[in-house]
Image: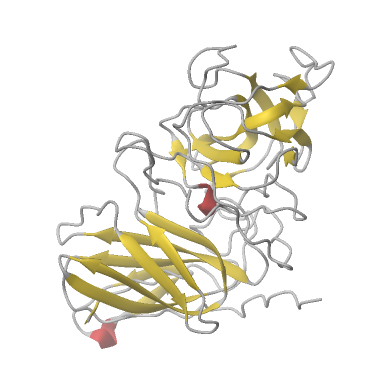
Amino acid sequence: MKDFLLFITMLGVLVQSNNPANFHLIADGTRLLQATNSTLIAPTASPTPTPESLPTDFVEGIGGNSLQFPTPEPLPVSAWRPPLYPVPWAATAHDHFLFTRPIAADEINWPAADYRYGGIYFGPDIVHTGVDIDAPYGSPVLAAAVGKVVWAGYGLLSEEGNRADPYGLAVAIRHDFGYNGERLYTVYAHMSAIQVAKGQIVNPGDPIGVVGDTGHTTGPHLHFEVRLGKNNFLDTRNPELWMAPPQGWGGLAARIADKRDKTLTHVNLIVHSMDTGREWAVRTYGEKSVNADDYYRENLVLSDLPAGKYSIYFRYEDADFYGKFEIYPGQVTMVRFQGAKVFRIVTAEPSFTPVPATPSP
């Protein structure tokens, strides 16, 4: 079994050297930052406009009958999870946890393990551009941040009013803030009913609809997307890097590439908690319709990991690769693999006292 280099990026940039003693961290700061770095565009107050068409009642949906979108398998409901970090939350200059969860904490509100961003389902040309949240039929769907509803109804991908559209009944929100000078949008799809209208202003946690099974899906769940720059199918980003994690938990971003740094697709990996023994099966992105984060340049994300020590394992070119890393509270840990070489594992400690997990009740 071979080791590989894990470039762990925490509060800065890890500089590589051939001499392990020369690895060092360029720190970005010593204190937690909450929306204070220059990459965030501060929300601007604006008067609430008169909605272009106010709803008189729910917009009722009809069930879809296509098999183009997957349906998540039922997940065990955790008896307890910590509350989320407040948004905006940015423990480093590169993180951007700007959105709350679109499903309340009393239901499943984390991404379905088998239907993450960048997955391939039903064929090589069908790539998942969001995450699926396996909340029960009829669960309230909540706005993830303040903004203006720019779409409400059928036809988000095709044309307005098209009940055969893959997204089914969907809402798109253009938010009052952006990132790196670009607009941010969120999309909520497959709903059975919509409770907002185009032009309406919403705040975080406002109900905008209910979970359903409209569009191209075989069962009820919420499909959630984050779009950067344009409200377009081709401008999505991985929502797991944008939704606030539970307090005391963090996330993993990885770039798995060949020796020329070309990302590897469809690679299956196992992440193992060295503290609890729990394991997660994850897979690198497909080739089409997905976009990596500008900083992390990742092709795999695994969010909602309790802080602690982990190992990662996968096979590449008939060889086994194994490494260790650590997840810190409220932060993203970056793991990078490039080519079939033996590398040294480097772990960077945070330069502040991590926020502990909220005690169990």
Q: 206 or 221: nearer the eye?
A: 221
Residue in view at x 49 percent, y 21 percent? 157
Say how many tags the image has. Answer: 0
Residue in view at x 54 percent, y 74 percent? 328
Relative to 226, residue 63 above or below? above
Quarter occupied by the C terminus: bottom right
Relative to 231, residue 332 above or below? below
- In this image, 293 relative to 250: left or right? left
Relative to 334, residue 286 above or below? above
Q: Is residue 46 visible?
A: no
- Percent from the top left, x then y, of residue 147? 69, 32
Quarter occupied by the N terminus: bottom left
Q: Is residue 20 visible?
A: yes
Quadrant of the image occupied by residue 154: top right
Q: 73 or 272: nearer the eye?
A: 73
- Percent from the top left, x then y, of residue 80? 73, 68
- Percent from the top left, x then y, of residue 248? 65, 72
Relative to 146, residue 148 above or below? above
- Percent from the top left, x then y, of residue 36? 62, 55
Q: 331 or 224: nearer the eye?
A: 224
